[in-house]
Image (cartoon, helix red, strand yellow):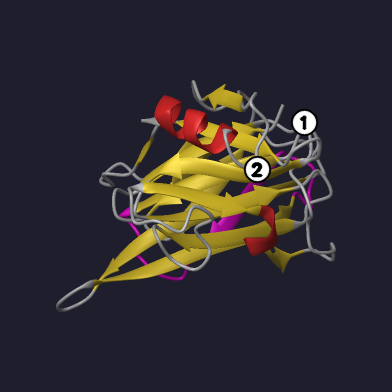
Amino acid sequence: MLAAYARKRATGRFLSLLVLLVIAGASRGATISFTNTTVKVTGATANGKVVLVGVALEPRAYHNRLNIFRDVLEDTDGDGIITKDLDNSVFWKAIWGVEDLQTRSYATGHPDRSPGRERPRELTFAPLANGPITTIAESGELLEFVLVRPSGDVYIAQVVDGGSDDRDGESNGQITASIDSFVLVAGTGTPPDRFNTDDVVFVFDADLLTITPVKVQ
């Protein structure tokens, strides 16, 4: 499907050569562990900062409430351990990702009872003709893209297949998110106009409770 999509888009406004990244898994560095009410990052750079992102489904009477977490946290005592208190024991059905802003390494994790998992995906980053990389494409019905810059600025784009922010405009099981759909949720950065080398993108599928991390190269 992705190969066919690449061929189709190459005939339009994109270059004939697309940058296809195959995700094999998270890089090694900080790790994530859990208690009933906390998320603990271990192995972070001493006195450094991390970006912690997560999706949790909170059971309600007739549905699950979606909770989204996006935090820039600092190791204030130099031990490489950072703990986020959730103040809630119901967030066990969740999937999380973390990036160490000093080493640019990243990892994923989930509570023991959670069905959440890291999902290897093939994501297509595509440039406009003779220009910067401005879109990211992946199969799905509803995806949240979390863009983390080396500065610690965090941007998100929530895109529905066939919705107004889906660049291909079709309900075809394929989502194309444009860089101009990303909004700042942490930090002081300006609106992005391209994907840069060494940007890290976490892709969440809340329906499947999956996460895919990828570094733009």
- Helix, strand or loop under label 1: loop
- Crowding at dot 2, Cα within 10 Å, few <14 / some 14-19 / many 20+, comes out as few
Please state which of residues 196 and 83 is positioned toward the viewer in this rendering: 196
Q: Quadrant of residue 213?
A: top right
Taking 72 as reference, is 47 above or below it?
above
Q: Amino acid at mark 1?
A: Thr
Sequence-wise first label, 1 or 2: 2
Q: Quadrant of residue 98?
A: top right
Taking 19 as reference, is 163 above or below it?
below
The residue pinned by badge 1 equals 103
Q: Is residue 120 visible?
A: no
- Relative horizontal placement of residue 196, taking residue 183 as reference (left or right): right
Name of the residue lying farthest toward the front: 11
Q: Position of residue 12 (x, y in %)?
A: 60, 41
The label on residue 13 is: 2
Q: Which region is colored magenta?
A: 75-93
Name the quarter where the N terminus is drawn: top left
Q: Nearer the viewer, mark 1 or mark 2?
A: 2
Q: In the image, what residue occupies the spot 35% across and 45% down?
A: 111
